[in-house]
Amino acid sequence: MRRGTKPRLGLALAGVVLAGAGWADDWPQWRGPNRDGRSPSRGLLQSWPQEGPSVAWRAGGLGTGYSTVSVAGERIFTMGDLEDGQYVIALSRADGAQLWRTRIGPIWPEENFPGPRSTPTVIGGRVYALGTDGDLLALDAASGERAWHRNLKADFGGSQMLAQGKVDWRFAESVLVDGDRLLVTPGASDATMVALDRHSGEELWRSAVPELGEAGVDGAGYSSAVVSEACGIRQYVQLLGRGVVGVEAETGRFLWGYNRVANKIANIPTPIVDGNRVFATSGYGTGAALLELACEGDRVEAREVYFLPPETMQNHHGGVVLHEGFLYSGTGHNKGFPLAVELATGRVAWGPVRNAGKNSAAVAYADGHLYMRYQDGLMLLVEATPEAYREKGSFTIPDVVEESWAHPVVVDGRLYLREQGELHCYDVADSP
């Protein structure tokens, strides 16, 4: 939906519909099953025809915003600003028909890229979603009925990093569910990160992150947390306004922090975890770093393995994926030039490449390939290999008006592309 238009409940456009289909895989949260941008799908097209993959269906009435989708069972979940509020929306996975929508809070009242950025998290018959105004809802996945509600500002004094003290893009985190714990990042001095009981919404612990350094600004960033088992300690790794940190999952105890990767505008990309290593990056002329986590008694130390200056690598908000020891992303602030970097050494294997895409690029991995979506709506299929940059197909998402920023989702032979008020579903399975 573009600004000023009315929502169209249940609109699904013509296409190939697999009614009653059984689904082999899910994408139940931000960046997929493991929050790493990697799809479990196999048997996908290894190149695209000139016109791009075929359209399975298109659905409308989703409202303004940059949320992508989560996919679980028979349903798809996303968020959007409609005329009377911000909503969590459920669609049929078979044909895109709208099943229910539940108001989560007020709409984004400003012209500064309005609408939600958060992606709902789905587990155990519940949907967990965070609105831009800090409203956190637990909903029944089948009906959209509310189970509980918290607010990150009212309950925890939450606030985001302010871009040089001026711009606030509000809460953009996609909440992490880990067992019975739900993790959110209010960004307050005494409640930087908070764990709730996912069943009841009751507080389990709150973590106060100490000062990390001069880089960046105080408050929550616009990133989403991931789980690490580094040093044998289950921990949550998150990129904040002052840098990347790790807190103990069981207690919220602060374990380690690293300041150099923070900027003063917006720290956005989700960190990459690999064994005892953490890779973090941000844009606005900042750079990227690989950290090695080491235990010293009950302490964890984050040791910098290397730092890549922004001229070598910086990621704005399109994210990074790790495949067979190499990192793939767009680089250059708001540029999205494809780049391949060896994780262990920081060596650039290829890139940056100046292709036909404009501005930032969001990336996902599936079946040996990168799915790169550019701000102007160009979609590229790129082979995920350190040998060379190889495009395997392209197409343009129709009717792009606003910035085309929502991350691509590839699951069970389908490519899902949220474009403001519409969701485009493409068939990318390699049919026999």
Image: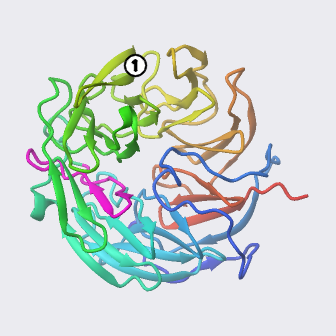
- Residue range corresponding to the magenta coloring: 169-191
Q: Is residue 331 left or right of 86 when viewed as pictured?
A: right
Q: Looking at the image, how many numbered discs can be counted on the residues?
A: 1
Residue 370 drawn above or below residue 15 = above
Image spot of residue 192 (x, y percent): 17, 46
- Based on the displayed image, in which of its 4 quarters is residue 310 positioned? top left
- For image coordinates 24% across by 51% down, the residue present is 185
Residue 80 drawn above or below residue 90 = above
- Based on the displayed image, in which of its 4 quarters is residue 278 positioned? top left
Q: Quadrant of the C terminus?
A: bottom right
Residue 185 drawn above or below residue 123 = above
Does 188 appear in magenta? Answer: yes
Residue that label 1 marks: 310
Magenta span main SS: loop
- Front residue (pair 10, 174): 174
Identify which amino acid the numbered label 1 is placed on: Pro
- For image coordinates 26% across by 51% down, the residue present is 250
- Front residue (pair 372, 154): 154
In this rendering, does residue 210 appear at all?
yes
